[in-house]
Image (cartoon, helix red, strand yellow):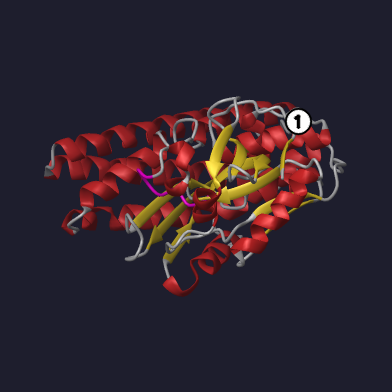
Amino acid sequence: MKTLIQNYQNTPGEHCGSTAMMNLIAHYCGLELSEAEVIGLGSATDFIYIKNEQNEPRILTLGRSKTMEIDLTQALGIDYRETPDFDNAHAWEVVKQEVLAGRPTMLSGDTFYLDYRGFGGHHFPAHRFVLVGFDDERRKAIIADRIDSTLEESAYDALAASRNPPTPISTYNLWGKFHGTDVKRTMREAYLFAINRTVQRMLGIDKSPERLLKAFTGKYQAEIVTGIAGIRAFHEDFLSWKTDEDWKKTVKYTSDCFERYGTGGGNFRKMYANFLEKAQQHTPEVVDQQSILMTQNIAKQWTVLSEQLIQLIKENSDHNWKRCHDQIGSILLQETTLYQHLEQRLKHAL
């Protein structure tokens, strides 16, 4: 058995999840959003600090929320749902049936195991891509990914390993389905909803991201902190990294997560600044020019930190450790100020 959905348009983008959702919403709902709008409406901006001795590296610093895809559709009022599945064979049969019915289907997995992405390199456990076809005879899944408009092929075994890997962090064959295609909120309503949720999470008023992430680490009991508190934990712990035997691996991965691994630059803050520029048209009483300029500067500061971390690997000195530590502290202050500023402006709009 084999099939391929012919009418799915795969426009490339900066980040996997936002690219996939941008294309899926265009396909299912006929709503043309920019990738920056997807990031912002999905309340994607976050900071996640994960410490787990069994992970590699043992510290992960991630700049976007785990639930951006669901959060985007909630903000817009679209009925889209995601489901994990602990049975690998069943999980594959379910998504095959979706594609046979002509429905492009969101998948999640670890890039480390995807053969078309090089099979190896580094672990990235929540990569997003879209299943658009398969060929049982060749045992190949046909994938739309973010890097290129052309489709990719993945061996069934590689895809299965990616979707439910034997590592401390798995998304357990997570897949997404549009149960409805109506957009039930106005754009102004969606913008207000999304900005408020981002502020609530960054300031630690809404702690649901932390609780969800801890559930996905299961028996491994990782230490997880999110939002401004996550940046604070990063700042407080950073100088202790130098005592770890594998500190270079951790520092390199951290630098890459801020800038190289599909963030659009500046740890997703550059795209969020672009979103705020658009948001100002819909919610001028919330998003002012100061908010935009602050976010643009914060994006630049994350890029600077990424560069400083690479320099630290090249030259392990107390000066470079302190310089990186001070930069994290500066980002912590600026992010706190930004979200407190937006919180005050939201009080007059909600």
Residue range in magenta is: 120-126
**Relative to 230, residue 33 above or below:** above
In percent of width and height, residue 58 lies at: 32, 59
Q: Residue shown at 49%/49% (left/top)?
A: 158
Q: Residue shown at 44%/63% (left/top)?
A: 166
**What secondary structure is the stretch in magenta mostly built from?**
loop
**Relative to 90, residue 28 above or below:** above
Assess whether residue 121 is covered by the magenta stretch.
yes
Q: Quadrant of the N terminus?
A: top right
In percent of width and height, residue 169 lies at: 47, 61
Q: Quadrant of residue 206?
A: bottom right
Q: Residue shown at 70%/32% (left/top)?
A: 23
Name the residue nearer the viewer: 307 or 335.
307
In percent of width and height, residue 198 lies at: 61, 48
| Secondary structure found at label 1 | helix
* Disc 1 residue type (three-letter): His
Q: Quadrant of residue 244?
A: bottom left
Residue at numbered disc 1: 282
